Amino acid sequence: MSESPMASSQTPQTSVQSRSFRSVAAVIALCWLAVFFDGMDVNIYGATMPHLLADDGLGFSPGIAGTVGSWTTFGMLIGALLAGTLTDWLGRKPLVTASVVLFSLGSAVCALAPSAGVFGAGRFVSGLGLGGLMPIGLAIVAEFAPPRRAALATGLLMTSYHAGGMAATGIGLAVAPEHGWRWVFWAGVIPAVIAVPLVLKWLPESPGVLYAKGRTDAAYAVADRFGLDRPGTTEAPQAGAKGRMSAIGALFAPGTRWATPLLWIASFAGLLLVYGVSTWLPELMRASGYSLTSSVTFLMVINAGGIVGMLVAGRTADRFGPVKVSAIWFVLTACGAFLLRTHLPLGVAYAVVFLTGVWLFSAQTMVYAATARVYAPAERATGLGWVTGIGRIGAVVGPSLGGAVVAGGNAGLGFTTFAVAAVLGATAITLVPLARRGRPARSATPAPAQTAA
């Protein structure tokens, strides 16, 4: 029989000092695998773009391709908002599983699509799963990671996104020229076969969610197993519809009411960059005068830079704070995008694209790391869901904007647009600490007397 919440005040809590990367390695590895497939599915579209445009039977044009990319990111917006709000009700594991199944199903629809309309519907379904997975994975890592290594753990998780992007590019280069783009999308069904069984068997549920559902013994067992503090009322989200609305309202409580929209703006700018570049970099480089093979390879290079950037930014942010790192990285991204406006020698172009990848993707990831610090534990999943969800508006705008630029044949304007978005992101994230001044300090782990109260 489960203990009552009042009983938690009488139960000694596990010290977070016992938590290390080794003790939570299995959790982070499972999230890493799921997000790897997320990154693979997102980047498959950009990796196959030249072949989609060349398929007369499908009926793609640059404008239609940009619209389909926006359908994907619109699905992500809905998925992120729903997942961030529902995860405290339904649990982390069921929503991770549902997200992986959804984007695998969407990839299968794309592989079978007879027209651009059906293809777009498949990408929308994929977007629901892709958008739902990211905030849940970030919330899981923020909860289970060692407290002083939270930014590094977030960066480590996001290396998987770029490893997935590199895998998608490699599959696109190896498979699409000889076997066609459809086989590349069939590879997007693999996550349902590999990741779902592993998640169902090994991914633990959030102790806070278990505690909120009244499963106190199970919550304590998970916390003890992974070296987490045993949850109390501060960590546990409120149950029911009232609790979900309360979590949303907390995003605009004193101390966060101005930080929340600033985080949304930073996420908007960051995701406009991430998805605009992931979708259109090969075509923009082709418009700048590079060959087809080189243009697709640039997508692999920028994702390789993203992996390096996640590790560098994570370690740096744990020392200096994710806000500072995110702001500086956004500014450096603007510089890299501005340099790409001109046709550079191939070797120099590869170096600039790699460095831009180092800064671009981790600038956005450090927005997530900053978000995890802004909100209290019971608000964190909802806060991350809304930051990623509202940010998806930028992900909707990015591909459409890129399509319009490519259709106009002006690659320089596309890179200038990305540079302006990076400056906007730097400005917004820089203002977050000012908006947080005066917020009452709240302990992530309540004292026994507080829990009893």
Image (tube, grey):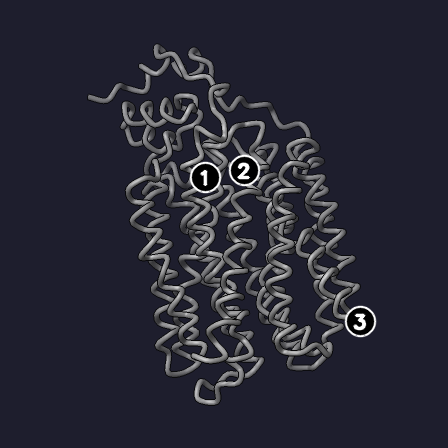
Q: Nearer the viewer, residue 110 or 165?
A: 165
Mark drawn on residue 17? none
Residue 416 visible somewhere in the drawing: no
Residue 56 visible somewhere in the drawing: yes
Provide the secondary structure element on which disc 2 rests: helix
Q: Where is 263 relative to 338, above or below? A: above
Residue 410 lies, in percent from the top left, at 73, 78
Residue 332 lies, in percent from the top left, at 76, 52
Q: Is residue 425 left or right of residue 300?
A: right
Disc 3 to disc 1, C-alpha distance: 41 Å
Sooner in the amino-acid sequence: mark 3 or mark 2:
2
Residue positioned 53% across, 50% down in the render: 388
Residue positioned 40% across, 27% down in the render: 226
Residue positioned 55% across, 42% down in the render: 156
**Dot 1: few (<14), some (14–19), or many (≥20) neighbours within 10 Å?**
many
Q: Where is 438 relative to 9, above or below? A: below
Q: Is residue 268 left or right of residue 59?
A: right
Residue 96 lies, in percent from the top left, at 37, 48
Disc 3 to disc 2, C-alpha distance: 36 Å
Q: Amino acid at mark 2?
A: Ala
**Dot 3: few (<14), some (14–19), or many (≥20) neighbours within 10 Å?**
some
Q: Where is 359 relative to 15, above or below? A: below
- Residue wearing tag 1: 28
- Residue wearing tag 2: 153
Residue 219 lies, in percent from the top left, at 32, 27
Mark drawn on residue 342? 3
* Quarter of the image with the C terminus in it: top left
Q: Is residue 337 left or right of residue 223?
A: right
Disc 1 to disc 2, C-alpha distance: 8 Å
Provide the secondary structure element on which disc 3 rests: loop
CB atoms of marks 1 and 2 within 8 Å: yes
Sooner in the amino-acid sequence: mark 3 or mark 1:
1
